[in-house]
Image (spheres, rainbow, N blue to C red):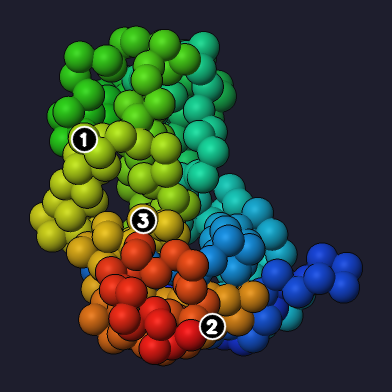
Amino acid sequence: MAKRQAELEVKRLSLSFGGIHAIRDVDLSVHTGELVAVIGPNGAGKTSLLNCITGFYKATSGDIVFNGRSITRMHTHKLTSLGIGRTFQNIELFPGMTVLQNMLLARHTRSSYNFGLACLFSPSVRREEVRHHEILEEIIDFLEMQSIRKELVGSLPYGMRKRVELGRALASEPSLLVLDEPFAGMTLEEKEDMVRFLLELHDGWGQTMILVEHDMSIVMSISERIIVLNFGEKLAEGIPSEIQDHPEVIRAYLGDTTDLGLGTKEAEEVA
C-alpha cells in the first residue's frame, strides 16, 4: 500500500466542559509515516485530544490542520472521507453482524455509486463491489482473520474483536490512523500479535499513526516520538529514551514508575 500524505498540526488546542479544562493550549504535530504515541496519567486529556482530532468533540479554541486544511469544526463523516480513521477505547462494532459485514460498512465513504445504481446493480457497481472485497480480503489476510471472516463479531473473544476493529478502521483506507488504547484488555499473546501488526503497518505499509496507550513497555518499544499530557497540558515531547528519563514525566507517573522502566533509586531521587 502506497504511503499517503498525513500531515497533522494541532495548534494551541483547548477544550472545556463548563469550568473544567480537559485540554489547555496543546500543540503537537504528526508527520507522514510517523508513529506517535500520546501518554499521560488517567484524566490527562488523552482521549479528549483524540476526540477533537476525529470530530467527536469540538474544541473550545485553537486549530487542527490536516494536510493544510483546517478540520477543527468538521463532522466525523467528513473527516473519514478526508482520510482519518479511528479505533475506540471501548469497542464500537456491530455484534450481530459478521466480521466481513462490519468491515464492509467502512467502505461506504469510498463508494461512488448512488442508491439508484445500487438497486440496479449495474456493471459499474459490480466492478466497484469487487474492488471493495479485494481490499477487504487483503486486510483480512494481513490481520490473519481468514478463519473468522464469516463469524458473528459478538461470538469472538475480546482480543479478536479489537483486531476486527483495527481491520474496519483500515478498510476506510485512512492516511492517518488514530488508535485509542489498542492494547487495552488484551492478553500478552494478543498484545504481541497487535504489536506485530502495528509495526508491519508502519514499516511495510507506511501507515501514519497516532495512538494513546497505557502500556509503557509497548509505547517505548514501538513509538518514534512520544507526547506526554498531564492535567490537560503538554508536559513533554521527545523520543522514547528522552521521555523515559524526563524528570517531569517521572513526577507525573510517581506511584506507577515501574511502567516507565524506572528503578526504586530513580523514583526516590525524584521524590
Q: Nearer the viewer, mark 1 or mark 2?
A: 1
Residue 27, horizontal then vertical, whole percent: 53, 85
Please report whichever mark, 3 or 2, sits nearer to the chain's N-terminal start.
3
Amino acid marked by disc 2? Lys
**Left or right of residue 30: residue 224:** left
Instruction: Give the residue displayed 22% in from the left and 28% down from the top.
Output: 140
Instruction: Give the residue displayed 35% in from the left and 30% down from the top.
Output: 159
Q: Secondary structure at mark 2?
A: strand
Amino acid marked by disc 3? Asp
Amino acid marked by disc 1? Glu
Residue 163, horizontal then vertical, whole percent: 32, 34
Name the image quarter holding residue 184. top left
Please report whichever mark, 1 or 3, sits nearer to the chain's N-terminal start.
1
Q: Secondary structure at mark 3?
A: loop
Of residue 258 and residue 171, the one placed in the foreground of this image is 258
Q: Badges 1 and 3: C-beta atoms under 8 Å apart?
A: no
Residue 189, horizontal then vertical, whole percent: 21, 35
Report which residue position mark 2 lands on.
234
Q: How many marks?
A: 3
Report which residue position mark 1 lands on.
189
| Label 3, residues with CA under 10 Å away: few <14, some 14-19, many ≥20 | some
Residue 145, horizontal then vertical, whole percent: 22, 24
